Amino acid sequence: MSHSLHPITQSARFRVLLAYCCLAYTALGNAGPIVGGELRIAISSDIRSTNPGVNRDGSTDAVLYHIVEQLVAFTDDLNVEPLLADRVDISEDGLNYIFTLREGVVFHNGEQLKAEHVVSTWKRLLTPATGFRCLDWYDGKGNSGLKIEEVTALTPLSVRFRLNQPSSLFLHRIANLQCLTGIVHPDSVSSDGNWLKPIGTGPYKLEQWNRGKGVTLRRHKDYSARPEVRTGLTGNKTPYIERLHFVVTPDAIAAQAALFSGAVDLLFAVPPAARHSVAARHTRKGDVVLKDYLTLDWTALLIAPRDPLLGKPEMRRAIAHALAHEQIAEFANLGMAPANASPVQVISPYYNVHHSQWLEYNPDKARELAAAAGYRGETLWLQTNRKYSYMFDNAIAIQAMLQAAGFNVQLRVLDWASQLSNFLRGDFQLSSFGYSSRSHPALLFGTFTGDRSLTKTYQWEAAEARQLVAELATAAESEQQEILDRLFVLMREQVPLIGLYNDHNTDVFRLRVKNYEPWAFGRPRLWGVWLDDGGTQQ
Amino acid sequence: MMRYVLTKLLLMIPSLLLVSALIFGLIRSIPGDPAEMLLGDNLNSTALAAARQELGLDKAMPLQYVYWLKAIVSGDFGESVMTGEPVLAALSERFLVTLQVVVPAFVLSILVALPAGLAAAYYHLRWIDRSVVLFATLCLSVPSFWMALLLIYTFGISWGVLPTGGFVSPAVDFSEGIRHLVLPVTALVFVEIAILTRMMRASAIEVLQQDYITHARAKGVSEWRVLFLHVFPNAFAPSLTVIGLILGSLLSGTAVIETVFGLPGLGRFIVDAIYARDYPVIQGSLLFVVVIYLGVNLLVDLLYPVFDPRVRLS
């Protein structure tokens, strides 16, 4: 075996030391974790199912990753570290991954986690009838061609995954949040293969799902926590709060009212436009706490690649020169998120000075290039929607800037389903769009780069770009930075789309909630959190 | 009477058939489909084709309609594409929530609006009349969501005496259930009261000018009897149509109020389904709403002769 992924790295050792110092400080009489109590979290829509990775949306993911756990998970700094695994060994040829499981991990039904459970979970996920939404990431039919050939239990606590080709993104994929590969007990599924309920190993277990009203989770008392400090979705995930109530509160203003009245304790992913009123409450009454953070979500202006006019490189560059990125980011985020034209997210470890350089704002140059492309003032339609306020705000700013540079741009405001449908069919000229969190920039490049005759959602068809994205999938860690830099240089030349910024969010919670920290994926993590009026002090 | 009811019930069948075809066609004429919404971020052409096949969306539209109609006739409304919930069970559950908000609001509106409208007519152009008209106009001018937010701010946040949202069934916890119903019911009452009061006032003013009222007064009949035995039944009959329409619209869901107060009722269910292009839920729910309207219309038709003997059912 050539490479190994160990749970404790040097920086992690420092974090462990820091955690022990904190514990010692706590032991000297200061307030530490308190076990008990009930926390109410507002979610804008009901969950779709309790079936991880099968029928999901953002609310569903936020609930389910408290119940199930993957073999590996993301850390705060977007690295992949073991979670249910104790270590991961990768063979020299990159085709075999051996996950050695932690001892003493128990499911919600009291049974010990074994390699056979990993095998049964993955067999189920890889069966087409299950309806796993990311099956093509692993069955050889996706863009990368990656296929899991076999999942075998080597010993009661070790599992081998055999791949058809090496993949530098394999661990990133199985740590992915949108396609949860949480290990579940076989009793989660009936004998005829129907999903019953998730019996996982996570810090919380499902207690009740009242459709339309919300979901209640209960503390997993026998949860086996990792020794490292809490980071991302791994590290120490000890649950302290007895019950978590995810309450469906569809209206954003009503959700704020519920927070102010104490009916809910936590609002997450509050957009910048709504931040003002919670900040005012914080200043005036001081009974809520705000935590701001940048996410991995990336907003962009899509330009129809095969449009007779917009497909011309001069026209695309003209549009890029007409947009002042910093001003758009300032306008849409009230100054809280920097502009970012690169798919490499600002908080990504791969983000460097190359990725902060984009085409200069120069309306005169934009006019010249547009004239050279043969633009004669034809109406350009920019699609947007009101569901995602940032897409609408971006569209307003883009329209104003393009008009100032002599482009005749009109907005077409649609409902989200219609805009999404047009995106899938490639039926737009300009579209104010957003890509949700991808942990690795390669996954984001892969989302919009490819052959459009196969999939209309690809915005970048250049052979060189496709080649580089393919290389990224198998490149060693040390080579990835260079490929990402080259990809962005190419992107600056060809302008396949125009990136704007990574979203800024705010999580707001009442004072009784302690030790809560948001993170880049924009969903709450409620292990390691306690209530100061919760119950028994640890 | 029985014959009338039976005829009306039979006439519902072509109405329902026509409406079902309209619903089926209209929802498919707007862009987007449930497969796209279901896959969301994880979309690619293979997964999309598989999802469409799984949902039967790859079949010809007339065929899809026939399958759906066949299932509906046998009582199978299908399952929600988004949640996998059986549509009929979900509809009943959501309708029960709507019912618990709408019925008290409807009864309260009638109890307040009818006497207020009658009093305003009786004291036409005097201060009582002007006060009632002013109040009704005010209620009519304030949008329901704004009224809801004002109530939440006042009673939920400033005074902190009532919950700002959520639903607890009174059958599970009576006092908590009632506390959760107070604000949404009040918000609904404010809106409905305005329409009913104005309708009742207008009808009563007209009736008060009729010769038979002058005649009754000339005979020495007390004002009390004139008002309640002669004016009220005659003025109420035209209001009955409006009451029927209001009841129909309330029962088919009060999406705005349900959204603001986080109530899992029928209105929010339908709106969410439309945004998600959840075809089985949209089709089943809208058909259910049509049945509600037809049922309420039938009820109003049957009640008409009770208040206005000149009307005969035939």
Image (cartoon, coloured by chain):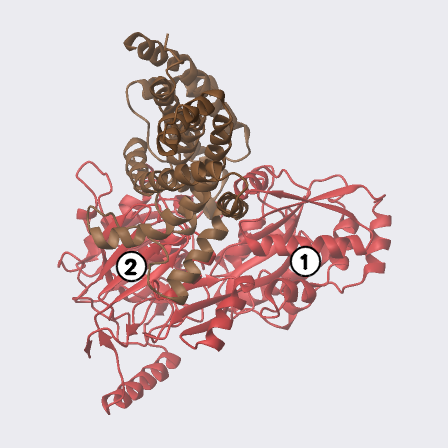
Bin the neighbour count of mark 1 within 10 Å (Cα to Cα): few under 14, some 14-19, many 20 and up: some
Q: Mark 1 lies on which chain?
A: A
- Label 1 in the same subunit as label 2: yes
The amino acid sitting under disc 1 is Leu
Of residues A376 and A533, the one nearer the viewer is A533
In the displayed structure, A343 sits above or below B69; it is: below
- The quadrant holding residue A306 is top right
Determine whether the residue tagged by mark 1 lies in a helix, strand or loop: helix
Residue A501 has which mark? Answer: none
Determine whether the residue tagged by mark 2 lies in a helix, strand or loop: strand
The amino acid sitting under disc 2 is His
Q: In the rendered image, is residue B135 in sight?
A: yes
Q: Which residue is drawn at 35% across and 11% down?
A: B10
Q: Which residue is drawn at 38% across and 36% down?
A: B81
**Which residue ends up furthest to the left in the rendered image?**
A110
In this rendering, position of residue A537 left or right of residue A467: left
In the displayed structure, A1 sits above or below A17; it is: above
In this rendering, position of residue A390 left or right of residue A317: left
Q: What residue would you read off at disc 1? A: A490
Q: What residue would you read off at disc 2? A: A245
Q: Quadrant of the C terminus of chain A?
A: bottom left
Tell me residue B28's x, y (percent). Answer: 50, 28
Mark sitting earlier along the chain (1/2) = 2
As drawn, the chain in brown is B
Of residues B210 and A375, the one nearer the viewer is B210
Tell me residue A404's x, y (percent). Answer: 80, 56
Q: In the rendered image, is residue A139 in sight?
A: no
Q: How far apart are marks 1 and 2 (CA)?
A: 48 Å
Q: Quadrant of the N terminus of chain A?
A: bottom left
As drawn, the chain in red is A
